[in-house]
Image (cartoon, helix red, strand yellow):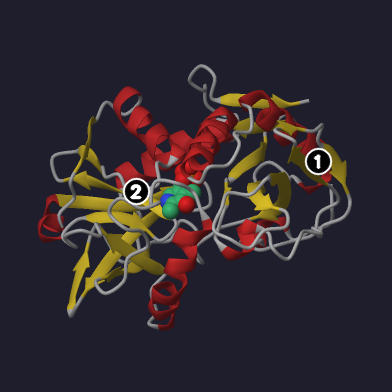
Amino acid sequence: MKDLDWKNLGFGYTKTDYRYIAYWKNGEWQKGELTKDNTLHISEGSPALHYGQQCFEGLKAYRTKDGSIQLFRPDQNALRMQQSADRLLMPRVPVDMFIDACKQVVKANEEWVGPYGSGATLYLRPFLIGVGDNVGVHPAKEYIFSIFVCPVGAYFKGGLAPSKFLISTHFDRAAPHGTGAAKVGGNYAASLYPGKYAKEHGFADCIYLDPATHTKIEEVGSANFFGITKDNKFITPISPSILPSITKYSLLYLAKERLGLEVEEGDVYVKDLDQFAEAGACGTAAVITPISGVQIDDKYHVFYSETEIGPITQKLYDELTGIQFGDKPAPEGWIVKVE
Ligand SMILES: *Cc1c(COP(=O)(O)O)cnc(C)c1O
């Protein structure tokens, strides 16, 4: 294993040893390979650079107690990348090719997967970009699918400590029928400016509202929202402009099947935040981050506590991370071993 301060890693880029790269040319995928080169050499006209024809994914590899390495639901990332690709007229990466590429790149960088118990994981960043000579607004004729990996710790400073968020009332990350449900860079480009404002004012990030009416919670920065009502119901927003989080769908399942909670995907009106005893942000990078409170205009709303994690949020965290690190039994098909 590499000599890193595994317990104190943040969420940042590290150049690891190998990355996977495959080219799509003449209407088909070429055989992918591992390379040590962490730079890309692409046409200045590449549609990814000018018209945002690109999408990405994010998933993690986990070290278990017995020292083995495993992935959490990579098939779901593969399928979601196909949906993003469809929306932006890019070729689909077949599910088998995607999972095989994940395994190859993790295996080649296995020394970068932190020790069990350190909290560190290996973050995988698959991406698909439109490349080649071009200048008009057209889909590319050639594509690159690549995956690089970085060892990471907590995404939000403070990890499991509750974070506070600023509800963005002036800026949206996505349009009502735009690309909010696709994991594309354009949504993130739109979020940089409001995100910077939130961070400068002491918040972890912005919460985005539904772009049509600005009355309902949609995204918590780059994570999905969930709340636990005072009568123990797990509620998470539903909307065509929310990015369908794999962590969120996993929690919906675990809340119902393992914690016995009632679960619901529905509207979360800002005016009804009092119904929640606990709230959290969930995603691969954020894992589960308790939301201490939210600022909307000049009003600050506290959920469970400014300093403590709520009991149900803690149970969900333990169940989810228990499965990811191999300490709890996983539902069928959720775990893929890297051998
Ligand atoms: C990736 C992402 C998430 C989290 O999805 P997971 O599959 O749980 O990692 C949530 N919101 C946005 C905007 C995202 O890009």
- Viewer-proximal residue among 22 and 227: 22
Q: Position of residue 174 (x, y in %)?
A: 36, 59
Q: Which residue is mark 1?
A: 110
Going 24% across and 71% down the picture, which residue do you hit?
A: 169
Q: In this rendered view, identify the residue nearer to me: 277 or 300.
A: 300
* Residue located beneath label 2 in the image: 242
Q: Is residue 27 left or right of residue 301?
A: right
Mark 2 vs 1, N-terminal side: 1
Q: Is residue 118 visible?
A: no
Q: Name the quarter where the C terminus is drawn.
A: top right
Q: How would you rate the neighbour count of disc 1 (Cα within 10 Å): few for under 14, some for 14-19, many for 20 or more?
A: some
Quarter-of-image position of residue 85: top right
The amino acid type, in three-letter code, at marker 1 is Glu
Name the mark nearer the viewer: 2 or 1. 2
Q: Give the crowd class for mark 2: few <14, some 14-19, many >=20 residues within 10 Å.
A: many
Residue 170: percent from left, percent from top = 26, 74
* Some atom of ligand 1 lies within 8 Å of the CB belonging to the residue at label 2: yes
Say whether residue 320 is left or right of residue 241: right
What distance separates the C-alpha of mark 2 from that of mark 1?
A: 33 Å
- Name the residue rendered at 59%, 65% in the picture: 50
Identify the residue shown where x is 79% and y is 42%. Answer: 20
Task: Work out which residue is located at the far front of the displayed protein and give it.
Answer: 136
Q: Judge whether 22 appears above or below 309 on screen.
A: above
> Where does residue 3 sit, x and y in percent of width and height?
84, 56
Q: Is mark 1 within 8 Å of ligand 1?
A: no
Q: Is residue 305 visible?
A: yes
